[in-house]
Amino acid sequence: MQIGKGLLNGGPASLFLAFTIWCAFILAVTVSLAEMVTYLPISSPFIRFAGRYVDEAFGFAAGWNFFIFEAAMVPFEITACNVIIHYWSDAVPAGGIIAIILVLYALINFLAVHYYGEVEFWAALGKFLLIVMLLIFTFVVMLGGNPLHDRFGFRYWNEPGAFTELYYEGTLGKWLGFLQCLILASFTIAGPDYVSMVCFKRSARLPLVILD
């Protein structure tokens, strides 16, 4: 949804560098959390780790931050679905789309855990397949598989350029464009704490002796 704005503000090179740098940080946090929760499998791990190893106030803030993040994601996803559907067709009014999505949200969350897990599994699989198909589609289009049969490849990295100037001209403008892409990456790629929940479910089944 938002990656096009980053491409416009920072250019392809800034977008690529920003996502690469941010993914490196996310990977480090993810691996660290996985190791910690494997050593100490407790419920609500990343929140309790924050209180245990830093400060109880920090754990309290981490818990509320996670709640606000999850609460904000619901209207964001509803808005995103509405924008995507209306991009292709205006047959259904915005109110109708929002109502349908809210009903689906309620039904999925009121179902038993087994069915909720199934929905999450198939939704994640669909997202993975969509990513693979988009990568293949982009590759084919870049090599001329488009209505104009234009083999553009990396042409736009040279003209208008790999880095886009934002607000100012010259180096400062390119730096601001990169920062805009980095902010976009930090919002787009989040949730390394989820791995601690998964690792907790796995580790909780293992006979471990915890020395405290």
Image: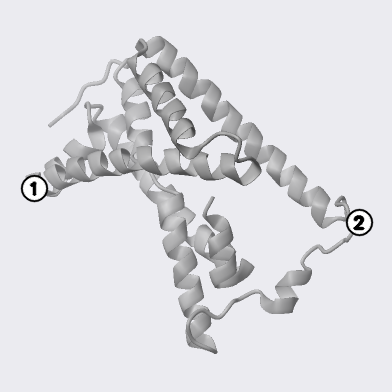
| Residue to which mark 2 is pinned | 149
Please say whether residue 192 is visible from this viewpoint: no
Marks 1 and 2 close (CB-CB < 8 Å): no
Residue 147: x percent and y percent? 88, 52
Mark 2, secondary structure of its residue: loop
Displayed quadrant of residue 46: top left
Q: Which of pointers 1 and 2 lies earlier in the amino acid sequence? A: 1
Residue 15: x percent and y percent? 56, 64
Displayed quadrant of residue 85: top right
Mark 1, secondary structure of its residue: helix
* In the depicted structure, whether residue 144 falls above or below residue 72: below
Residue 119: x percent and y percent? 48, 19
Mark on residue 115? none
> Which of 103/10 is in front?
103
Name the residue at 55% across, 71% down.
Answer: 10
Hey, what amino acid is under mark 1?
Answer: Ala
Q: Residue furthest left?
A: 56
* In the depicted structure, whether residue 175 falls above or below residue 64: below
The C terminus - image quarter: top left
| Residue to which mark 1 is pinned | 57
> Which of 188/208 is in front?
188
Residue 72: x percent and y percent? 32, 43
Relative placement, left or right, of 199 versus 173 is left
* In the depicted structure, whether residue 204 falls above or below residue 176: above
Hey, what amino acid is under mark 2?
Answer: His
Mark 1 is surrounded, within 10 Å at the Cα level, by few (under 14), some (14 to 19) or many (20 or more) other residues, namely few
* In the depicted structure, whether residue 93 falls above or below residue 141: above
Mark 2 is surrounded, within 10 Å at the Cα level, by few (under 14), some (14 to 19) or many (20 or more) other residues, namely few
